């Protein structure tokens, strides 16, 4: 397996991204303590087939059930005592997989002052992919066909990013660490592009109807 790794660090946030192409596997191990804050883990099978392995924590995969064969999302809360976490991905021939791990060491109050351009962009990408997974939509980077059960409403996204609907949940606690202006900007962009998700399924359905495989839509 060919691996590409990127590490981005700041005083408030560290992000590590590992992509693997081809058959094989890779493992990441690291220690987490209260000083490390919340940890967001996103595991993705982008192309082909693969499997996941996680050890050292009890948090459940919070991706929607329809995506759990392709994506895993975990939010690890600050630990009272240091503990060792291990995540791994196995990939079949001609597959591509990715692991993204973000350690939120503090609250992001002023995005331009606290995050570099690459780190801010990586954070936006991670939050969008994770949030879509929570709502049952595959990451835009997953190239193999994945069905969307029901696209989320704009109101549902708004409640997740800036509302109080999920107060007390790990998603809400983690998002509260992110600069509100950045969360609002991500929400605005997602709202503007949601039509693309609907359009994608409409195009697939229309093509299916044209060749006579799908019944005409009402």
Image (cartoon, rainbow, N blue to C red):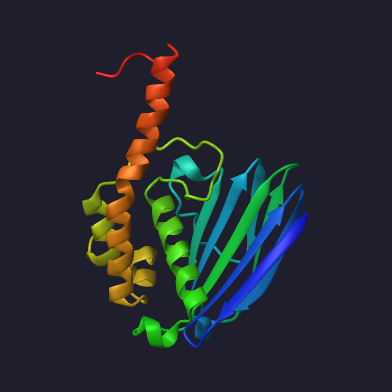
Residue drawn at 40 percent across, 88 percent down: 113
Who is closer to the viewer here, 103 or 217?
Answer: 217
Give the side of residue 27 with respect to residue 179, left or right: right
Residue 64: x percent and y percent?
A: 43, 47
Residue 75: x percent and y percent?
A: 47, 65
Residue 4: x percent and y percent?
A: 70, 64
Give the side of residue 25 with respect to residue 31, left or right: right
Above or below — where is 43 with respect to 110?
above
Residue 196: x percent and y percent?
A: 35, 44
Count of numbered circles on the image: 0
- Residue 154 seen in the figure: yes
The N terminus sits in image quarter: bottom right
Residue drawn at 30 percent across, 67 percent down: 185
Residue drawn at 32 percent across, 56 percent down: 190
Residue drawn at 47 percent across, 63 percent down: 126
Give the side of residue 85 with respect to residue 92, left or right: left
Who is closer to the viewer here, 109 or 77?
Answer: 109
- Residue found at the far top of this picture: 212
- Residue 83 seen in the figure: no
The C terminus sits in image quarter: top left
């Amino acid at each position: 397996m060919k691996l590409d790794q990127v590490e981005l660090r700041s005083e408030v946030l560290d992000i590590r991204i590992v992509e693997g192409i081809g058959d094989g596997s890779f493992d990441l191990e690291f220690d987490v303590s209260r000083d490390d804050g919340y940890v967001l883990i996103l595991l993705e099978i982008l192309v082909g087939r693969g499997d996941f392995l996680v050890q050292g924590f009890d948090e459940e995969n919070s991706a929607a059930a329809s995506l759990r064969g392709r994506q895993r999302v975990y939010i690890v809360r600050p630990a009272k005592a240091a503990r060792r976490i291990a995540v791994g991905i196995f990939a079949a021939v001609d597959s591509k997989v990715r692991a993204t791990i973000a350690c939120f060491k503090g609250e992001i109050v002023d995005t331009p002052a606290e995050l570099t351009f690459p780190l801010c962009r990586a954070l936006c990408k991670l939050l969008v992919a994770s949030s879509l997974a929570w709502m049952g939509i595959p990451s835009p980077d997953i190239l193999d066909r994945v069905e969307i059960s029901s696209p989320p409403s704009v109101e549902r996204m708004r409640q997740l990013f800036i509302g109080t609907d999920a107060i007390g949940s790990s998603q809400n606690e983690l998002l509260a660490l992110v600069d509100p202006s950045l969360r609002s900007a991500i929400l605005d962009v997602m709202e503007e592009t949601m039509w693309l998700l609907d359009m994608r399924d409409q195009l697939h359905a229309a093509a299916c109807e044209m060749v006579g495989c799908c019944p005409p839509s009402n």
